[in-house]
Amino acid sequence: MSAWLKFLPWLLSACCVCAQSATTTGAPAAGRPAIVVYGDSLSAAYGLRQGAGWPSLLQERLQQNKFNYIVVNLSISGETSAGGAARAAAALGNAKPAVLVLALGANDGLRGLPVAQLRGNLAAIVKAAKAARSKVVIVGMRMPPNYGPQYTEQFQRSFSELAKEQGLALVPFLLEGVAQRPELFQQDQLHPTEEAQTLILENVWKALQPLLKK
């Protein structure tokens, strides 16, 4: 069984709502524009030590490259696109992000929710981000093949199509280079390891870096 298929039951059961912040969950420091990570367990560093998740590594990367941004991680384990849409206006209004990294959808897909519903919810979050004058990076996800070719293809396309329609930066697949490598999962074969976080960061960085200003 591939690592991605082993990864499936964890995502299905990840329903706790305890966000793990990479840097801060409050408003950004005065004078420092914020990059808000708005995702689920994959971005909340679920099962990892504090500071080991890719959003924390992103903060380190920004400092190393002299980008004066603060990363605000508003990811919640088990979050769906509907939950993200419901809290988007308040969350983004408080954080006032310069850039929003929108990394939701995995839980929608693993629950077999309609792709049209996912698209609508993501579009609502993008609308809230644009109202807050934020740039947006859409982070794509993919489903295991056992969901059937029609659903998996429609699900995968939903992210790229939304990015194209809205003129947004796109990460094609958050777990590129991770999903099919069992050694990049923790001992339970369900959770990505700390080593995997650096690969996830690289996937995000390719789309995010061009939007940043020094």
Image (cartoon, helix red, strand yellow):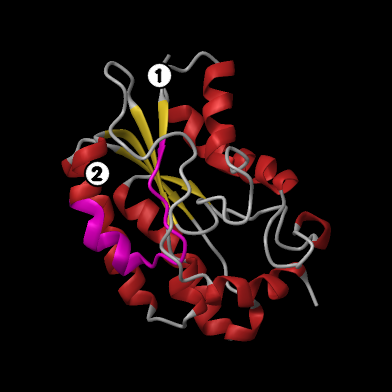
Q: Is residue 17 magenta?
A: no
Q: Nearer the viewer, residue 12 or 101?
A: 12
Question: Residue 98 at what x, y percent from top left?
Answer: 31, 31
| Magenta residues (range) | 72-89
Question: Which mark, by number, is residue 213?
Answer: 1
Figure quadrant of residue 72: top left
Q: Residues within 10 Å of mark 2 (few under 14, many from 20)?
A: many
**x 57%, y 25%: residue:** 60
Under mark 1, the amino acid is: Lys
92 in relation to 97, above or below? below
**x 52%, y 70%: residue:** 14
Residue beneath label 2, please? 92
**Quarter of the figure with the C terminus:** top left
206 in relation to 8, above or below? above
Whether residue 186 appears in this view of the structure is yes
Q: Nearer the viewer, residue 62 or 117?
A: 62
Local SS, label 1: loop
**x 24%, y 57%: residue:** 87
44 with respect to 196 (left or right): left
Local SS, label 2: helix
For the residues labelled 2 and 1, say whether their Cβ atoms are less than 8 Å apart: no
Q: Is residue 82 magenta?
A: yes
Figure quadrant of residue 131: top left
Under mark 2, the amino acid is: Leu
**Quarter of the figure with the N terminus:** bottom right
112 in relation to 2, above or below? below
Q: Earlier in the sequence, mark 2 or mark 1?
A: 2
Question: Residue 176 at what x, y percent from top left?
Answer: 66, 54
Question: Which mark, by number, is residue 29?
Answer: none
Mark-to-mark CA distance, 2 and 1: 20 Å
